[in-house]
Image (tube, rainbow, N blue to C red):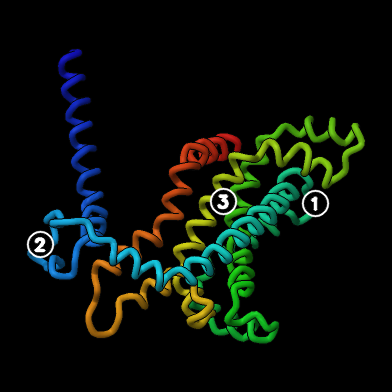
C-alpha cells in the first residue's frame, strides 16, 4: 500500500515538473532571444542557446521604453493606492455600518464589474475631454480607480465581515468615531486584504491595453502600448522586442515574488471570513 502511494506521488510530481517545463518554454524562448545577436535569430535556431551573451537588445529596448515605463509607474502606483483606500472605506461601511439600502447599493456597485470596456469607451473619452483629463496620466488614474472600485470593495467587504463587531463596539465606547475605528482598528487588521487588492489592481492596471491606447497619445502612453509599437513596421528586431517584453513584465514579477505568500494568505482569509 505504501509503495503504491509513493509511486502515485512520484508520478504526480513528475507530471507537475513536465507541466512546469512546458509552461516555461515561452519564457525560455524570450530570454534566449533577448540575449542573441540579430544573425542568430532565425526560426530554426529558436530553441538553441546563444553563442554569446549580447545586451544590445536590452539597451535599445530600455532607451525606447524608459519614458513609458515611468508613465506606467505614475499610473499604476497612485491608481492602486487610491482604489485600495476607497475600496477599504466602501467595504468598511458596507460590512460594519450598514444602512437601509446598503445591500442594494453593494449589488449595483458589483454590476460595474460586468460592464464591458468597449461599451463605454466613446462616452468616457467625451467625459475626460470635458473635464480636461483626456490624454493625461491623471485621466487614466481616474478611470482605473473607478473601474477598480467594485472588485476592491468586494474583496475588502468580505475580509471585514470576519472582524468581530464587538471589537468595533468596544472602540466606540472608548470614544472612537467612524474614522478613528477605521484608522486604529480596521486598517491594522486588513494588511493581508490590502496586499490582495494591491497585487490584483497593480497587475491589471500595469497590463491593461485598451484604455491606455484609446485615452492617451505617444508621450503619455504606458509601457504596454509602447511595447506594441516597438515591433516596428519593416524589420522586427526580435531581440529588442523580447528584451522589452521582459522589462515590461519585471515589475509585476517582482510584486509577486515579494508579496506572493501574502496574496495567498489574504485570499484564504477572505474566503473563510466572507
**Foreground mark, 3 or 2?**
2
- For residue 112, say whether it is visible: no
| Quadrant of residue 164 within the rendered picture | top right
To which residue does mark 1 refer?
99
Q: In this picture, is 81 found above or below 271? A: below
Q: Position of residue 95 (x, y in %)?
A: 71, 45
Q: Left of 147 or right of it: where is 259?
A: left
Which of the two discs, 3 and 2, labels the residue nearer the N terminus? 2
Q: Distance between the residues labelled 1 and 3?
A: 28 Å
- Secondary structure under the numbered disc 3 in the rendered image: helix
Q: Distance between the residues labelled 1 and 2?
A: 65 Å
Q: How far apart are marks 3 and 2 (CA)?
A: 40 Å
Q: Which residue lies furthest to the top in this view?
A: 1
Residue closer to the observer: 26 or 70: 70
The reply to whether discs 1 and 2 touch (Cβ–Cβ < 8 Å) is no
Q: Left of 114 or right of it: where is 180?
A: right
To which residue does mark 3 refer?
198
Q: Left of 148 or right of it: where is 25?
A: left
- Secondary structure under the numbered disc 1 in the rendered image: loop
The residue sitting at 53% across, 69% down in the picture is 71
Q: Position of residue 55 (x, y in %)?
A: 28, 61
To which residue does mark 2 refer?
45
Q: Quadrant of the C terminus?
A: top right
- Secondary structure under the numbered disc 2 in the rendered image: helix
Amino acid at each position: 500500500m505504501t509503495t503504491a502511494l509513493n509511486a502515485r506521488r512520484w508520478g504526480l510530481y513528475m507530471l507537475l515538473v513536465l507541466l512546469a517545463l512546458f509552461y516555461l518554454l515561452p519564457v525560455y524562448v524570450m530570454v534566449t532571444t533577448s540575449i542573441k545577436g540579430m544573425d542568430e535569430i532565425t526560426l530554426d535556431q529558436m530553441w538553441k542557446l546563444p553563442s554569446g551573451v549580447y545586451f544590445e537588445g536590452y539597451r535599445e529596448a530600455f532607451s525606447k521604453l524608459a519614458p513609458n515605463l515611468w508613465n506606467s509607474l505614475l499610473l499604476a502606483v497612485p491608481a492602486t493606492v487610491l482604489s485600495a483606500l476607497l475600496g477599504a472605506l466602501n467595504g468598511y461601511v458596507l460590512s460594519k455600518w450598514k444602512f437601509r439600502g446598503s445591500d442594494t447599493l453593494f449589488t449595483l456597485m458589483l454590476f460595474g464589474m460586468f460592464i464591458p470596456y468597449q461599451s463605454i469607451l466613446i462616452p468616457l473619452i467625451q467625459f475626460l475631454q470635458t473635464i480636461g483629463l483626456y490624454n493625461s496620466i491623471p485621466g487614466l488614474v481616474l478611470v482605473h480607480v473607478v473601474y477598480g472600485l467594485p472588485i476592491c470593495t468586494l474583496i475588502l467587504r468580505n475580509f471585514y465581515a470576519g472582524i468581530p463587531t464587538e471589537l468595533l463596539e468596544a472602540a466606540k465606547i472608548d470614544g472612537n468615531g467612524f474614522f478613528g475605528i477605521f484608522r486604529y482598528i480596521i486598517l491594522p487588521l486588513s494588511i493581508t486584504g490590502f496586499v490582495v487588492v494591491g497585487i490584483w489592481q497593480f497587475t491589471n492596471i500595469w497590463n491593461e491595453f485598451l484604455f491606455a491606447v484609446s485615452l492617451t497619445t505617444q508621450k503619455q502612453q504606458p509601457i504596454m502600448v509602447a511595447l506594441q509599437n516597438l515591433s516596428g513596421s519593416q524589420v522586427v528586431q526580435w531581440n529588442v522586442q523580447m528584451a522589452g517584453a521582459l522589462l515590461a513584465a519585471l515589475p509585476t514579477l517582482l510584486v509577486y515574488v515579494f508579496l506572493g505568500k501574502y496574496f495567498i494568505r489574504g485570499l484564504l482569509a477572505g474566503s473563510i471570513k466572507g
